Each structure stands twice: as structure tokens, then as C-alpha cells.
Image: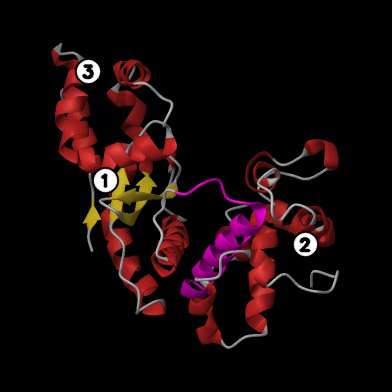
Amino acid sequence: MAVFPIYEDFFRFLEVLEVGEDPWEVYEEMYFRPHKNFFGAYWRTFFPLMDVRTLQDRVRQVRRGHYAALEHLIGQSRPEDIVQENLSRCRAHLPRLPEPDVYLIVGFFSADGFVVNVNSRPAIGIGLERFKDFRLLDIILAHEYCHCARYLALGSCAETEPETLGQKLLSEGLSVYFSQRVYPQRRLFDHLLMSRRRLNWCQQNEQLLKTTAERELTSSRLVPVFFQRGKPGAGIPPRTGMYLAYRLVERALSEMREEEFEELLTTRDIMAIWPADSSGR
């Protein structure tokens, strides 16, 4: 598998922005068309309702100065070098599964890390415009690496129907647990991609999270509550599902052999390992 630093073509596009040509035509020629296999899959997966005019309008608003901080960051530390170095660490923990391709992009609405189906195979995408530094790039890579491994183990692609809460909890819990295996020296709240303060809240309210989730495991209704916006009226902050997911997988694996982690990749729902007691600990 390979690392594709296609962000380099975005910066080539920026270099010729000021010469009077239509920015969209230059963007399409220098960035979109050369990587149409990736971008076709990317837009189809994450922005299926966005029409081309919306993208054209966004491209025509671009100025090179908007990306000065990112350009400086990349000049200090090339993300492809970080990714290449850390892919080998991820592969060492899942040696029987193929290593995924990694695409380093600059988009407009990207997540920092995501999985997308390119040429009928799950691949990792890294949206560089989201980064102010690369301190967590290794953790994000490991997290998405596990998602890719799960798709491969299940024999399914990255483009799926909406997940139930039970499916989402298992998927995210496995990925957090995997990144912790690869980088055991890193802090838990970094693996969870949350603040120390948010982790403290989660630890103090673990039973509330478990009880709230337990009633909705077969539905997708609370996925946004646990993994995006939270539920202020119920006192639940955003993204607390990451902690609950991790704790459920951690508990399950504490009662299994270490090598059974790979077997869990083929489990489809958290209900298979949901604790029978009500303590959540």
C-alpha cells in the first residue's frame, strides 16, 4: 500500500491563483482531475447532496494567505514522513491484514481523519486543513487504521448504511483501544481526542452514559448525541460516546486473551460484549 501526498497539488494550485485565471478551472485541472478517483469517492461518501456550484463558489473564495499557517507547518514537518513512519507501527499490531492506502489532502470540509472507499477498498484520508500542529497525527492515523482493518475483516467497504448506536460504540471503542495499544505511552484523553476535563466528566458519569446508551443500542437515534453534539438538556457533553465505547471494549478485552482483539474486529455490534451487570466497571 502507499501514502499519497496529494496536498502538494493543492499548494501548486495556490501558487498560480493570482495570475488572473478562473480559480475553479485551475483547481479542477491541477487538483481535482489528477486525483478524481479519490475525490469522486470522497464527495460521494461525505457530501452526496452538495452540487458542483457550491464547491466552485468555495474554490473561488480561496486565497493563498488562508493556508499560510498550514504551509509553514508542512515546511517544518512533512506529514507523509510522519504517516510512513507510523504505518509500520500499526501494521506490527495487525500483521495479517493488508495495510491501507493513505491520502493526505487539503479540503474545505474534511474531518481530521476518515475512511473512504477508493477503488473498492477502504483507505484512510487525512484532512490537513484541520491541523494546527501534528501532535496527534500518529494517534489519528492509528485510529483510522483500525477502522480500515475492521472493514477488511468484515469483508465490507467503508460506505455503509447509518450505524446503530451499538455498532458505532463497538467500532469507535476498538479504534481507541487499538491506538492505545500502538502508543501506550500517550495519555488516555489524547487517544479519546478530548480534553482532560471532558475525560474527568466521563469518568465521574460513566454509569449515566451506560444507562442512557443501553436503551438505544439497536437504534441510530442517539449516535449524534454520543458522538457529535451531546445533549445539553440531559447534561451530556459532546463526544462522550468515545469514552463509553473505549471502556466497553477495554472491559471485554480484560476478560479475553490479548490475541482475541483481532477476533473482535469481526464482531458487528457492542451487544455481543455488553456487560451483564449494571455497574459499567
- Quick one: label 1, few (<14), some, or many (20+) residues within 10 Å? few
Residue 19 left/right relative to 178? left
Is mark 3 in CB contact (under 8 Å) with mark 2? Answer: no
Question: As drawn, which residue projects farthest toward the bottom?
Answer: 257
Image coords of residue 168 (percent x, y): 60, 55
The residue beneath circle 2 is: 203
Taking the spot 23% from the left edge, 48% from the top edge, the residue there is: 5
The residue beneath circle 1 is: 75
The residue beneath circle 3 is: 23
Q: Amino acid at mark 1?
A: Gly
Considering depth in this image, is 2 or 217 the residue closer to the camera?
A: 217
- Quick one: label 3, few (<14), some, or many (20+) residues within 10 Å? many
Taking the spot 47% from the left edge, 49% from the top edge, the residue there is: 160
Residue 263: say if magenta. no
Q: Amino acid at mark 3?
A: Pro
Considering depth in this image, is 204 or 270 the residue closer to the camera?
A: 270
Image coords of residue 281 (percent x, y): 79, 73
Helix, strand, or loop for circle 1?
Answer: helix
Residue range highlighted in magenta:
160-184
Residue 171: say if magenta. yes
Q: CA distance from mark 2 to mark 1?
A: 39 Å
